[in-house]
Amino acid sequence: MNSPHSTGNMFRLGFAAMAMALTLVGAALMSDSTPAQAAVVSNAAAITIPAAGTAGPASPYPSQITYPGSGETIVSMTVTLNGFTHAFPDDVDVLLVGPTGTSLIIMSDVGGSTDISANVTIDDAAAGQLPDGNVLIPTGSYQVTNIGAGDPFAAPAPAPGAGTALSVFNGTDPAGTWSLYVVDDLAGDIGALSGGWSIDVTVAAAATATPTHTATATSTGTVVVATGTATEETAPKTHTPTPEVSSTPEAATEVPSAVPTSPPVQPSPTVAGGGVSPIAPPDTGSGGYR
Ligand SMILES: [Ca+2]
Ligand SMILES: [Ca+2]
């Protein structure tokens, strides 16, 4: 049931979103020493609940999403189950497993026997949990909700972690394969996630440059620090470092001379920027980075 093409496109969109986020971060969050960016990756292929009959693992089992890149750290995340329909939502148990093996039951035994047809987002910041009992679940955001215990997740699913919030994934690297194991644990009644699922991950920008400047990750990293200080000054300085990608030697020469002028670490980039400005004209010609 997995759709490689669809998934691949979503990845590209994810990259595009990351690149865009990178641009926005560079323009709006330069004063933040640890800017964050968000990326949404999805697998829109439908998940049938269960795979056959009226109980058992869903198909596919698991449904997977590959988060691109590496070296990032999750600050927060949400998970959305798209087009969730079921005649007895209480039958449905959902286990999310991250690339590093962390696992969490994000939804289980909720909604009773009230038919559901909604997009359900699991978000630690939501106002409340999903309802237990026969209550209609409308589209919206809810906290992780696992009613009852001992939910059966057949192999290859790992044993569910004991966590009770998506924050269990915080601090881990989102890169790699995310798996969603959906199970229908009771005979009678079926459903689906007709639109698949997605994860919206906010990460620390440690590897911000990875998506667009693979070969210049080192110099770019330096630029991030410099721009942070330049924020309060003028925009020109912000862009000055960028062109340096093609002329690394110059940047290296400029920085040292600037250091003595400023006590704290941050000032150095500032002065460096100022020192580079005069030279910028010639470099700008080759850069044209805007
Ligand atoms: Ca449960
Ligand atoms: Ca069932």
Image: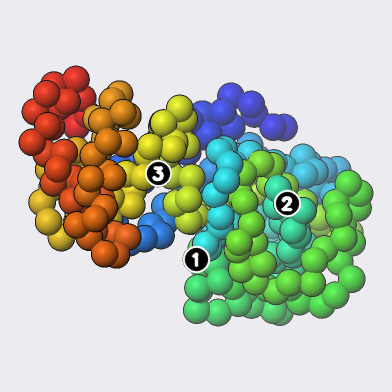
Q: Earlier in the sequence, mark 3 or mark 1?
A: 1
Q: Earlier in the sequence, mark 2 or mark 1?
A: 2
Q: Position of residue 63 (x, y in %)?
A: 72, 42
Q: Dot 3, how many residues are within 10 Å of its Cα: few (below 14), some (14-19), or many (20+)?
A: some
Q: Position of residue 133 (x, y in %)?
A: 71, 79
Amino acid of disc 2: Thr
How many numbered circles does the render carry?
3
Amino acid of disc 1: Gly
The residue pinned by badge 2 equals 100
What is the number of the mark on residue 140? 1
Q: Dot 2, how many residues are within 10 Å of its Cα: few (below 14), some (14-19), or many (20+)?
A: some
Tag nearer the camera, 2 or 1: 2
What is the number of the mark on residue 221? 3
Q: Position of residue 147 (x, y in %)?
A: 76, 76
Residue 158, quarter of picture: bottom right
**Quarter of the figure with the N terminus:** top right
Task: Indicate whether 147 appears above or below 232.
Answer: below
Residue 260, quarter of picture: bottom left
What is the number of the mark on residue 8? none
Q: Earlier in the sequence, mark 2 or mark 3?
A: 2
